[in-house]
Image (cartoon, rainbow, N blue to C red):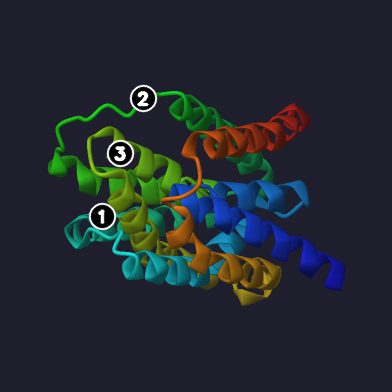
Amino acid sequence: MTEEFLIFALIGFGAQLVDGALGMAFGVLSTTSLLAFGVPPATASAVTHVTEIFTTAASGTSHVVHRNVNWRLVARLAPAGMIGGGVGAFILANIDAKTIQPVVSAYLLAIGLYILFKAFQPLWPREVRDWMVPWIGAGGGLLDAMGGGGWGPIVTSSLIGRGHAPRQVIGSTNLTEFLVTTVISATFIVTLGWSELRSAAGLIVGGVLAAPLGGFLVSRLPTRPLMVAVGLIIIATSIPRILAAF
């Protein structure tokens, strides 16, 4: 039990360091790791999101302190993201694990490829179109709940690609994720029960320890090498599970 706790704590610490610096990847890194340990998809997503209640609260606070948050963006993202997340969690909790696992792995593989693709794309300034923000939030919340991750890769990449300032997008996305993941976690707890989520303890400890560093790292670590590393890790852990399903 102690060994498992330490392993999950290290996973949580590393995943949150990357997430704080990029505004993405805690969910997909944690979920792929849990799936690799044989945790069912719904439980893996639930554990990840319960952990994110704590890590996103700490990370969001760090970004507020470092003035990385655009409050207008948060107000437009949060409601749609919470609705999408609740719907996605309810659907995943009511689908058979054997049926959904190849789908979840394929989704995570796609996210890994997308992160890798975005790492080599220049971020040209574009016109900011705020009318798309709620739709991006709803889609990000839905897919995040069903895949155990994806809020950051979908929402952060989309908003930066549409011309929002990267620093404010990363800070605002991290803060908003606290609200979205709270709704997702509550839905999972109601449908799955709390006893299934005991492995969250290690992830919570590791993630919370790393979270305060996110606001500091966001303006200091090179983004492209981190995105390449995250993309490759997600791809490498997803492919074997997809092949095993066939």
Please state which amino acid type lies under the numbered disc 1: Leu
* Side of 4 relative to 163 (left or right): right
Q: Quadrant of residue 125?
A: top left
- The tally of labels here is 3
Left or right: 167 with respect to 112? left
* Quadrant holding the N terminus: bottom right
Q: What type is the residue that disc 3 sits on?
A: Ile
Who is closer to the viewer here, 68 or 232?
Answer: 68
Residue 122: numbered disc:
2
Q: State the residue at coordinates (50%, 46%).
A: 221
Q: Is residue 70 visible?
A: yes
In the structure shown, which secondary structural element does the residue marked by tag 1 occupy?
A: helix
Q: Is residue 144 left or right of residue 196?
A: left
Judge the density around disc 3: few (<14), some (14-19), many (≥20) Cα neighbours within 10 Å: many
> Residue 206: percent from the left, percent from the top?
65, 67
Sequence-first disc among 3 and 2: 2
What residue sits right under mark 3 in the picture?
Answer: 160
Q: Mark 1 = which residue?
A: 77
> How far across and how far down the image is residue 143, in percent?
44, 45
- Percent x, y for residue 214? 48, 60
Q: Nearer the viewer, mark 3 or mark 1?
A: 3
- Tell me the residue at 40%/24% (across/down): 121
In this view, the residue in front, 166 or 46, is 166
- Point 70% across, 50% down: residue: 33
Q: Please, what is the three-letter code of the amino acid marked with disc 2?
A: Pro
| Eye-nearest disc, 3 or 2 | 2
Residue 191 in sight here = no
Q: Residues within 10 Å of mark 2 (few under 14, many from 20)?
A: few
